[in-house]
C-alpha cells in the first residue's frame, strides 16, 4: 500500500507542481500575447493569467496545481476562453489606464521644466502614486467580478484604498519576487510573469474579500 508523501518529499513535490504550473502559465501568456500581435494581446493575456491564478488560489489545496485541470491542454482551453471574452474590455482598460498614467508623467515633466509649481508637482505625484496602486488591483477586480466597463475602474479604486496593508504586502511580494530572480536568473525565462503576478493576485484577492465582507456585514445590519 502506497503511503502519501510527507515532510521534505511532499514539499518538494508541491514546489515542483507549482513551478510546472508557472512555466505553463508563462508559455500561455507568451503565446496569446503573440497571437494578439503583442499590442492587442498583452493585456488580455495578462488578465487571463490572473483569472487562472484566481481560480487556483480559491480551489482546495490539493487541487490547486495538479490533476486534470492542470494539464496544458485544459489550461489552454481555459486560458483561450477568457482571453477571447476579455479581449476588447481588457485592451480598453489597459490602454486607457496606461494613457492616464502617461499623461501624468508628461504633466510632471512639463511642470518641472516650465511651470515649476511645487503644489502642482506634489499633486501630480499623489495622483501618479494613486494610479500605480490602482493598477495593482484592477486585474484581480477584472478577473473576480462581472461588471460594466466603467465600474471596473471604480471598484478597483475602492478596493485599492480599502486596506493599505495589502498594498504594502503586494510591494513586499514584488521585492521578494525580484530577489528570487536575482538568485535564480533562469526563472526570468520560464516563469517571470506568474512569479510577479502571484503576490499581486494573492494580496489583492485578500483585499477584495475584506471589502466583500464589510459590504455583507453592512447589508445584514441594514436588514436587521
Image: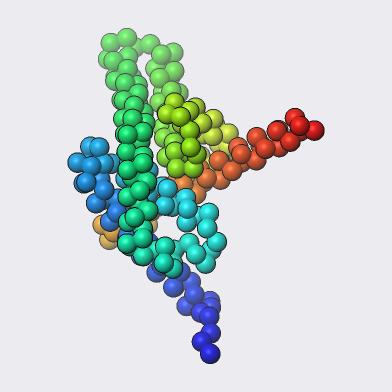
For the image, the number of numbered tags is 0
Please state which of residues 9 and 210 is positioned toward the viewer in this rendering. Answer: 210
Where residue 86 sits, quadrant-wise, is top left
Is 176 situated above or below 40?
below
Residue 176 in percent (x, y) is at 43, 52
- Above/below status of 24 relative to 162: below
Percent position (x, y) of residue 223?
76, 32
In percent of width and height, residue 12 lies at: 44, 73
Seen at 71% across and 37% down, the residue is: 217
- Residue lying at 41% horizontally and 13% vertically, measured from the top left: 120
Q: Is residue 45 left or right of residue 158?
A: left
Query: Quick check: 163 above or below 181?
Result: above
Which residue is more in the foreground, 49 or 220? 220
Q: Residue furthest bottom?
A: 1
Q: Is residue 159 left or right of residue 33?
A: right
Q: What residue sits 25% from the left and 37% below the top?
A: 40
- Which residue corresponds to the image point at 40% horizontal and 19% vertical from the top-left? 124
Check the picture and name the quadrant holding the C terminus: top right
Residue 196 seen anywhere in this rendered image of the structure: no
Q: x%, y% of residue 153?
A: 45, 28
Quarter of image, res 24? bottom left
On the question of residue 145 being in view, the answer is: yes
> Where 126 falls versus 58 (above or below)?
above
The figure's colour scheme reads: rainbow
In this view of the protein, which residue sits in the foreground, 9 or 41? 41
User: Which residue ends up furthest to the right in the rendered image?
Assistant: 224
Amino acid at each position: 500500500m502506497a503511503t502519501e508523501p510527507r515532510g521534505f518529499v511532499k514539499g518538494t513535490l508541491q514546489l515542483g507542481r507549482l513551478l510546472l504550473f508557472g512555466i505553463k502559465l508563462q508559455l500561455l501568456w507568451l503565446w496569446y500575447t503573440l497571437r494578439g500581435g503583442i499590442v492587442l494581446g498583452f493585456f488580455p493575456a495578462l488578465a487571463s493569467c490572473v483569472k487562472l491564478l484566481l481560480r487556483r488560489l480559491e480551489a482546495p489545496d490539493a487541487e490547486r496545481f495538479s490533476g486534470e485541470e492542470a494539464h496544458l491542454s485544459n489550461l489552454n482551453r481555459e486560458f483561450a476562453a477568457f482571453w477571447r471574452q476579455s479581449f476588447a474590455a481588457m485592451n480598453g482598460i489597459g490602454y486607457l489606464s496606461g494613457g492616464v498614467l502617461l499623461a501624468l508623467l508628461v504633466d510632471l515633466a512639463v511642470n518641472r521644466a516650465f511651470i515649476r509649481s511645487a503644489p502642482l508637482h506634489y499633486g501630480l505625484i499623489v495622483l501618479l502614486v494613486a494610479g500605480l496602486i490602482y493598477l495593482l488591483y484592477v486585474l484581480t477586480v477584472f478577473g473576480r467580478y462581472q461588471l460594466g466597463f466603467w465600474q471596473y475602474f471604480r471598484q478597483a479604486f475602492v478596493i485599492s484604498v480599502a486596506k493599505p496593508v495589502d498594498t504594502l504586502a503586494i510591494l513586499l511580494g514584488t521585492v521578494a519576487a525580484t530577489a528570487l530572480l536575482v538568485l535564480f536568473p533562469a526563472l526570468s525565462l520560464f516563469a517571470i510573469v506568474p512569479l510577479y503576478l502571484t503576490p499581486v493576485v494573492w494580496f489583492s484577492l485578500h483585499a477584495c474579500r475584506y471589502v466583500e465582507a464589510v459590504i455583507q456585514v453592512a447589508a445584514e445590519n441594514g436588514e436587521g
